[in-house]
Each structure stands twice: as structure tokens, then as C-alpha cells.
Image (cartoon, rainbow, N blue to C red):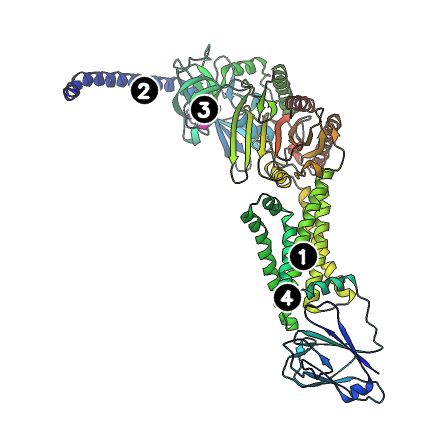
Amino acid sequence: MSIQTSRSAPHWLGQLLALIVLVSSSLSVLAEDSGRALWESARDAIVQVRVIERESDEKSSIGSGFLLAGHDVIVSNFHVVASAVHEPQKYSLQLLDSNGRTWSSTIVDFDVVHDLALLTVPEAVTASLAMASGLPEQGDAVYSLGNPFDLGQTIVPGTFNGLLEASFYQKLLFSGSLNPGMSGGPSINASGEVVGVNVASMGNQISFLVPASYLLALLERRQDVVPITGYQDHISAQLQQDQQLKYQRLAATSWPTQQLGDAQVGGSLPAFFKCWGDTQDEDELDVVISRTSCTSQDSIYLSSSLQTGLIDYEYSFVRTDAMGGLRFHRWLSQQFSGMRTRTWPGKEDVSNYDCQQSVVSDADATDWRMVFCVRAYHQYDDFFDVLFQATSIKQADAALASHFALSGVSQANAEAFLDRFLGLQQWP
Amino acid sequence: MAIVVEIRSSGAHGASRYRFSDDALARGVTIGRGYHCDVMLDDPHVASEELRLVRTDAATGAGSIELELLGDGVVRLAGQQLREGASVPSGTQLKLGRTSVSLFDETHTVPPTTPLDILLESLTSLASPVRVLLAGAIVYLLLLSDEAASQLAERDWLDAALSAFSPMVLAVLWSAVWALVTRVLRHEARFLAHLLVALTSLALSTIMGLASELAQFNSQDPATAAWLDPFLLGLLLCFALVLHVRITAGPMRWYGHGVIVALAWAFVGYGVLEDSNRSRDFQAWPEYSSVLLPPEAYLGTPQTLPEFLDGVGESFDRAAESRTIELEKAIDDGDASTNANTDINAGQR
């Protein structure tokens, strides 16, 4: 019976398969037609943005940009033109249009927090792209345009997958391949309207776009098409404003606590941080480590060596059943001897750390070894990287170690964060 | 003038002394393993009648002492084997087999013994394998105060043995090198003496390490390690080098010790200088003392939280001050990139 059934199946199944193949082929053709049409309509509005090293007169880095309808500026990313912002005496900007002609350009304005830049438009570039009136639906097709690896203009199909979660800023999740050189290019919907600006990729078709809303906000407050003097003041003001908003939002949010081993610690804030947890049982040492760590996702690109704006915090509860007090505390020393921010600024960007460390007894009469390290940003007044670590030393067989790292934070915000952080953790 | 023959047997503490008059010297004083000898040695490496001492001008009681070789054992003078008789002055030290024999005029004054001599004597007298093992066990226990102590307490025998094993191997290799040098210079390796010094140094190193940790934990200041560790290293180097060189080269004048101590501190000073230069460079990582010890090891009074937070504010002030200094330096050096108001479009085409 089953054999007969299986023999009779191909008759209707074959018809179904043929239908599916036919439909998918038709869709594929439609998609190809759509992509081709979009490419044809958008290509003249796209430019390659070149950062030219003046001495060699050759490009040192590239990105993409586009002309937005109704606005006489080329839109790109701040990180594409950052070298020319910081070292104008060394780098200039050049635009390559779709006809292969090059034009010099200058910076009009930028939004360093959301990684956007506005550049002057060459006269020959007249084609432009309209802004979409709203976000696409999740699953809608989105096409990204740009100049990957200096290989010429390309169009990359992908899928819109909503807004990035656990973030202080909105970012659009684009499931398509963004490659180096496409930064600053537009991502458009099936109607050819701009939904976002290409900005970053994590590989494996996980890419991010700056929402058009931030671009509109920048265009509204943009300065006239005149050279900006005092760019660091401009960046500094933006960073200050962003930081105030970010830490105010954090302060206004209720921070829950959670149990970790025998201790109470700060819990996760899913609106802003991605949190992970793990427990390791190290049999060789008879140590059990329970750990939770939370990291923010909003890195602000200032230069190739200086990214900032990150907030990370971590708790580890450690218990041993076999190690002696001396050995256990030595082991703790090794485990928690290194702390750092996730960013790696150079000596041009920051000073050396200054650390304050003490054995501290808190209100609950718990003794902690606390270390607080801070280093100042050279270019930006009242901006610091801050590291903090507290390790309980009350018990010989158990300890709580807490840690946070803030990059690009003012003294007032860092102290307020420290105060709140310390208030969350309790050791019995 | 009568002479005194001082006998120091290998592995024995103290010495035996025999006085011989001019008449006895004129007749000749015999030294050997035999019962008939004037000085009998309990040493299987000495012949039954090994040596005779004769005063050449016994009438006046002055002059040197003549050595006559009688047996077939090995008699060393200043590390060299004597092949024939010799004339030696007062104060001469001989080695017969494993026994030291010193010859003094009775008016000879024994120089005061320094603590270093006592220490060296104690160490070198522990020459038998059994006593070395005993000393090794003591050192081993000292080493256990480190990592292996806890493992031993936890009855983790294998790990405890392994923890103490590596430094032991290192000490053996180190001693072997010194023994080789000693063998070349003095015709005897004295490996066990070197090994004892090496093991004692290891134990001291462990104790000093603990002292450093204790100091760092109590001071909560990374600068403590910056000066304390080199200081302790210097002391340890002086101790180990002086003893090794003394075993290798024999007794030294004060300036001999001075040269060794100077070399040791020069080595330490170079390291401190290098570290000092490095710490002035840019450091991507914060420098703080990560040492953690059990709460009982903290002897001070903990800060209150408000006191700590005051310190945090001061850290910000220092960081801001450091920024100002570095910016001023950069401007003095003509680094345009640090100019806070550079025109971003200046010079663009």
C-alpha cells in the first residue's frame, strides 16, 4: 500500500513542484527586474567618496555617498571622512561620480554620534534620491548601494529586519552584505526611496543602517554650506549632548537587582544593554564562578584609533570548597588583575590612567578592595575613560567581584554611575 | 716557638687543637690515621701516616715549618695537591683527605669570626648527603608557604610536590654551574655547598615574595612594589652571590665583597631605571596593585566609602591635570593635531 502511494505521489507532486518552480522563477525575474530598474534609477545619485592624502595625491580610504532630493548636500558617514576632519592639512576629499569624473568636496556638517556627514555637491551631480516616508515592514526587500573595495558601484539586495534592540540609538538591521567602501551609501526600498544610510556590518549578512530620521534631523539643524572652524568644539558639543541624554535616560530607568550566588547585584537593562550569563565549574581548582556581563552596543567613531561612548558592567561570584584562603585570594588576584575598556585609543588620544585603590568598608561592614582608574581625552575637555573594580575580601572561600568600564564620560556622570552601581550590590 | 695544629673534620662542628713544643717539633710531629701518630685523624681518605711536621731551626724557635709527605693520600695546599715536601708559614691551611689541618704559631691570633663566616661555615659543614637532604626538607617547607602550602593543606600531594619541584630543579642546575667553576678554580666542586646556598636563596625569595605581597596589600599602592621588589631582589642577589663566590674563591677581603654587592645593586638599578622609563611611556592598561590576600592580612583601617569617593574625585583632577600638561607639551613640540581649533577645511582643494 505504501509503495503504491509513493508511486502515485509523483503525479500530483510533480505538478505542484513545477508550479512552485514557475512561481519562484517569475518572482526571481521580477526581483531581477526590480533590482535592475532600481540600479538604473539610483546610480547617478551615488558617488564614491575618496579621502586623498595630499602628499602622494592618492586615495588613502574610500566610502560612498549620495545626493538627497531637495537638499544640496552629499550624504555620507562621519567615519568615512573622519581623517579629513581631524587632519585637513594632510587629507582632502574627492568625489567620483557615476560618469567617472572627480570633484573636490568639503565638509558641510556632521553628526558624529549617529555617524553622518554632509558634503558639498559637485555641480555635475544632479540626480538625487528621495527620502522614504516611513520604515519598511520587517521582511521587505531593501537594496544597498555603494562602492565595495573600490570595485565600482554595486547594488546589494537584502531584507529589512527591524530596529536594533538593546541600544541607546536606533539602528536598522539590514540582512544583506555591506562591505568596506559601501559606508555612506544609501539603502533604498523597492520604490527607490532612501530608508537608511549604510554604516556597519558584522559579517554573515548582518549589517546596520543609520535610520533616515537621524539624517532628517541633521539636515534640519545643519549649518550653511560654509567651512566649519573649530571642529573639535563641534564634536565635543555633540558628544556632551549625547552623553547627557544617554546618562539621563539611564538614570531615569529603574535598575533592577538580581541574585548572583549569595550576593545581590545589578540586573540587566534590556533597553540599553545586551547581557550574558555563565557558570563555570573549574574542577581542577574546585572553584565555581557565576558571571553576568552586560555591554552597550553604541560605539561612537571619532577616529581610526578612538571610539567611545561604551558602557560595560560585569559581576562574578566565586566560591571554592577546597582552596585555602591564601591560595584563593591569590587566584582572585590573577583572575581580576586586568581591566580595560573595549576601545583601544592611542597615546595621541588619551593620557595614562590614574588609579585610586583602597580597602574600603561599606555601610554593611563588608570589606572590599576597590580600584578606580581614570584617563582624560586629549582633544575633548571633561571626557574620560573610567574603570572600576570592587572585590570583596570578607570571606576566605567566597568573593564577589564587580566591574564597570565607561568610555567617553564626564566626571559628573561617571561619579553618579559609580554611586548607583555601588548601591546595587550587596554582600551578605 | 710552639705551634698549634688545628683539625676540622668534614661534617663536624668546631675544631680540635693540639699544641706541640719546640722539642716535639724538632723530633717531628706525625699526622695520619694510625694510632702511633701524634695527631690521629678519623678519615678513611688519609693514609696511616700521611705527614710529618719539622721545625728547621728549632733552636731559635723561629722560621717556617717543613712538611714531609709520608703516605700516599692526597694532601692539598691552597687547592693544589702537594707532590713533594714543602716549607710553609704559620697560618697555612692544608686539606688531608676530607679533613682540614691548620698550622699556627702559638702566638697566632685567630681573627674574629664574622656572621658571614659563621653562616658560610654552617652551610658548608652540612656536606653529607643526609644533612643536605635535611636542609632541603627545611627549604621545601619554606617553599610550601607559597602555592604548595595550600595544596599540601588540601592533601593534594602530587600538585604540592610539582609546585616545589620546578624551583628545586632550577637550584640544582644553578649549583652545578657554580660547582663547575669551583672545580676549575679550586680543584673541588663543593656542589653540595652551592646547592645549600641556592636552596636557601629560594626559600628567602619565597619569604620576600610574601613580604612584598603583604606590603602591597596593606599599602594599596603600586609604587610599593616598584621600590620594594627591587630592594628585596638586591638583598637576595647580594646574599646568594657573596656566598657562591666565597665558596668558589675562598675567603675574600672586604673590597671583594664590595665589588660583588656593587655589581648586584648595579644590576637591580638598571632594572629600576628601565621600568621607570617604561612607566613614563603611554600605557594602554591601568597600573594598579592587583594583590589580594585574606582579610586577616590587612593590618590597616579600611577607608569609608565617602573617603574612597573623595579619592575618586582627586583621580579625575590628576587625570585632567595630566591632560593639560601633555597638551602643553604637544603644543610646545609643534604637534598641530592637538590644536583644539583647527580649521577643518583649511588648505583643502
**Image quadrant in which you'd find residue B310:** top right
In the image shown, does A146 or B127 lie closer to the viewer? B127
Label 3 vs label 2, nearer the camera: 3
Percent x, y for residue B128?
64, 66
- Residue on which disc 1 sits: B200
Q: Are marks 4 and 1 in contact (CB under 8 Å)?
A: no
**Image quadrant in which you'd find residue A116:** top right
In the image shown, does B305 or B164 lie closer to the viewer? B164
Do tags 3 and 4 sit on the same chain? no
Tell me the distance, in whole angstroms, between the alpha carbons under discs 3 and 4.
Answer: 76 Å
**Residue A213 sits above or below residue B78 on the image:** above
Dot 1: chain letter: B
Label 4 vs label 2, nearer the camera: 4
- Residue on which disc 4 sits: B128
Q: Residues within 10 Å of mark 4 (few under 14, many from 20)?
A: some
Tell me the distance, in whole angstroms, between the alpha carbons under discs 1 and 3.
Answer: 63 Å
Dot 2: chain letter: A
Image disc number at residue A32:
2
> From this viewpoint, is residue A112 visible?
no
Percent x, y for residue B169?
57, 57
Image-based side of B239 in relation to B284, left or right: right
In the image shown, does B326 or B249 lie closer to the viewer? B249
Image-based side of A210 in relation to B279, left or right: left
Tell me the distance, in whole angstroms, between the alpha carbons under discs 3 and 2.
Answer: 22 Å
**Residue B236 sits above or below residue A203 on the image:** below
Percent x, y for residue A153?
41, 26
- Residue on which disc 3 sits: A207
Please report the bounds of the magenta region as a residue range: A202-207
**Residue type for callout 4:** Ser
Label 2 vs label 1, nearer the camera: 1
Q: Residues within 10 Å of mark 2 (few under 14, many from 20)?
A: few
Q: Is residue A135 magenta?
A: no
